[in-house]
Image (cartoon, grey):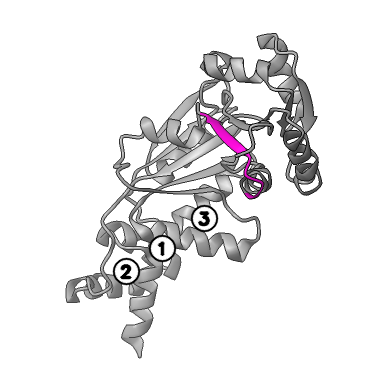
Amino acid sequence: MDNNLGTLYVVSTPIGNLNDITNRAIKILNKVDICAAEDTRKSSQLFNALNIETKLTSYHKFSENTKTNVLINKILEGKDVAIISDAGTPLISDPGRYLVNAAIEKGIKIVPIPGVTSAITALSISGFNIDKFHYFGFLPRRKNERLALIKEICASGITSVIFESGKRIGNLLNEISQELPSEVQILVAREMTKIYETFYRGTVVQILEQLNSTNYGTKGEFVLVISDFEKLQEDEFSEEDNRIMDLLWDSLTQKEALSLGSKILNKKRNYLYKKKIESKK
């Protein structure tokens, strides 16, 4: 590795509370020649609060293709560069992959400056099994892609982490409720480390009620953690299950029968509908 090259530092910043920044992060941000930031306006507030005078340059998802070469050239000239996101650890649902990969290709030294990330923060207080977990970040906006991924998540039985904004958290929970077994516990963390930090625990239906019962319940940034659970086996549909579904089907509307059947039998509505259709053939 060429000793005349600069270094790329991937620096974690607070997700809300400025006191969560590490001493090492402050030292590095003061030391580097330039800092690439997802939003220079937000990062300027952080720098002003910490008396950091390092030059900021914009580096977001719409500019990372063009800005990457500029920053790499700076490093090749011997300059030290840091990359930060608006909050938390860069590259975790944030820009930076192009820059890191370009640095790898050029043989540039890359140094991580670890710190907080909202996914791990939420997992740490979930109380769920986190020996193994899936991280999904923000789900796709396209409906078919999103619903297909939600179906996969809700059928996995593995603790899963999803990011969502306040504008869409209600819709996301409604979509999850169509696939997730009704008794599965989830955690919704709102505005973590900030003034209005709130944690909601319970089933999807219970949390929807909690969010809708307050004026500010759906404002801010959210991390959703779905608990691990024992997966439903496809052959676990007994004669008694079938009898109960027949009674419900004959007495209620299809939607009501599937909803009540899901709660009674502890099985997903889509699964019950599939079994009902199969029984008619």
2 and 1 marks in contact (CB < 8 Å):
yes
Q: Amino acid at mark 2?
A: Leu
- Badge 1 marks a residue whose secondary structure is helix
The earlier-in-sequence mark between 2 and 1 is 2
Can you tell which of label 1 and label 3 is closer to the viewer?
3
Name the residue nearer the viewer: 158 or 96.
96
Badge 3, how many Cα within 10 Å: few under 14, some, many 20+?
some
At a point 28% along the width and 60% down the height, the residue shown is: 231
Badge 2, how many Cα within 10 Å: few under 14, some, many 20+?
some
The earlier-in-sequence mark between 1 and 3 is 3
User: x, y (%) of residue 202?
Assistant: 36, 39
User: x, y (%) of residue 260?
Assistant: 34, 60
Quarter of the image for residue 281 reads bottom left
Badge 1, how many Cα within 10 Å: few under 14, some, many 20+?
few
At a point 57% along the width and 23% down the height, the residue shown is: 14
Q: Is residue 89 visible?
A: no
Estimate the spatial distance between the alpha carbons at disc 2 and disc 3, rounded to whole Å: 24 Å
**Magenta part of the chain:** 105-113
Judge whether 196 appears above or below 146 on screen: above
